[in-house]
Image (tube, coloured by chain):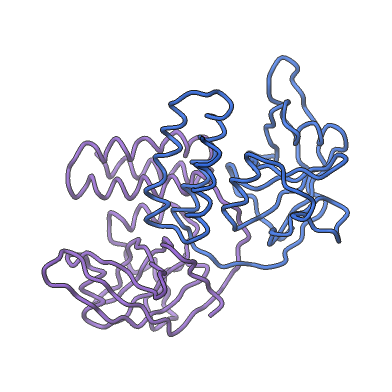
Chain colours: A blue, B purple
Amino acid sequence: MDIEFREGISEVIATTRNDRPNAAPIGIIHRKILYAVLYKESHTFSNVKKNSQLVANFVLDPRLYVRTAFEDLDASFFRSDQEAPVLQAAYAWVEFRCSIAEKLTQKSAVVHLNPIKSVVLRQPMIPNNRAFCALIEATIHATRYHKFKDQKYLGLALRYESIVRKCGGAEELEAFQLLKKYLR
Amino acid sequence: MDIEFREGISEVIATTRNDRPNAAPIGIIHRKILYAVLYKESHTFSNVKKNSQLVANFVLDPRLYVRTAFEDLDASFFRSDQEAPVLQAAYAWVEFRCSIAEKLTQKSAVVHLNPIKSVVLRQPMIPNNRAFCALIEATIHATRYHKFKDQKYLGLALRYESIVRKCGGAEELEAFQLLKKYLR
């Protein structure tokens, strides 16, 4: 595989399929083995449970992380030339065959990820941008706020706006405006 | 140029040369033009002032961001096969010719960056890792703490440890331990 999941957690947009494709940000965990921890209530988990397939999309557009965290993408966002569900915006992707190590007493399930195909369309040489990172952090807090309605998470999410404004480009600024819209 | 500096600020390790090479993390700013804002007291700035040369190193090792923020690297960290100062750890680099738009009343100077050479050795396909981002943030706060001795910055730096522990690999954990050593 050309694609490296470093030790720790890599943030990607997972796509899965049922009658229609679904996309949502998840973390791919590499600690000796590759796996993800998925909320059992999520579309991602119910799709994985149904057909054992998950694609990790590598995406540079920060707006897509925000959108997929909060809403469903329509079919036009997905490639029509692939059997697996793949985002148009993905510059690379890895398709996994999944096996669920479900723990019925918990709200989340461990899903083991076995890579069966990886595709690299472009190899962007892009150094670290603090605004992109800040958007990922803000989106994580925002989804917690959305779920638990705790003001603490709202404050944590909004705290990242200054980094996005200082270090981001137009896409990051637009993504943060979108995030604030979902937080209303 | 194969290498893309997206709109906003990209975090890299800058190398410059005087009698000996120097390395320090800086942000490369792309807002219509490419430039950096450098502290006039820094080695990076005095070297740029002397010979108008700066290399942006793309580095994946988080420990190097921490080390170069706080101490000088010895010569063994630099490539011996390059005229310009380049880190051994760089998977790609861009050499710039610099022109200083110095403002004498301020502590920082604007340095315009004109790319004259770019080299891509490897094209790592690595998705976003929150721990790597957290380390960059923690290092920025740590250097402020080091400079201004304000406890606020110490608190801000240490706040990132939980993300590093949760999302990082061995290199990120080691880098954070190193950071804490510099904070003592």
- Between B82 and B153, the one nearer to me in the picture: B153
Using residue B96 as the reference point, say whether residue A42 is left or right of it: right
Please tell me which residue is depicted at 62% across the width and 46% down the height of the picture: A67
Residue B176 falls left or right of residue A84: left
Residue placed at 38% from the left, 67% from the top?
A: B29
What is the x, y in percent for residue A118?
A: 77, 57
Q: Nearer the viewer, residue A29 or A58?
A: A58
Task: Name the residue at 68% across, 21% down.
Answer: A107
Q: Is residue B79 above or below residue B139?
A: below
Q: Is residue A124 left or right of residue A161?
A: right
Residue under the point 18% across and 67% down: B40
Above or below: residue B43 compared with residue A86: below
User: For the N terminus of chain A, which image quadrant?
Assistant: bottom right
Residue B157 placement (x, y as % from top left): 33, 40
Q: Is residue B52 left or right of residue B27?
A: left
Q: Position of residue A158 (x, y in %)?
A: 42, 39
Q: Is residue B152 above or below residue B63?
A: above
Q: Is residue A154 above or below residue A60?
A: above
Total numbered badges shown on the rendered structure: 0
**Most foreground residue, B132 or B17:** B132
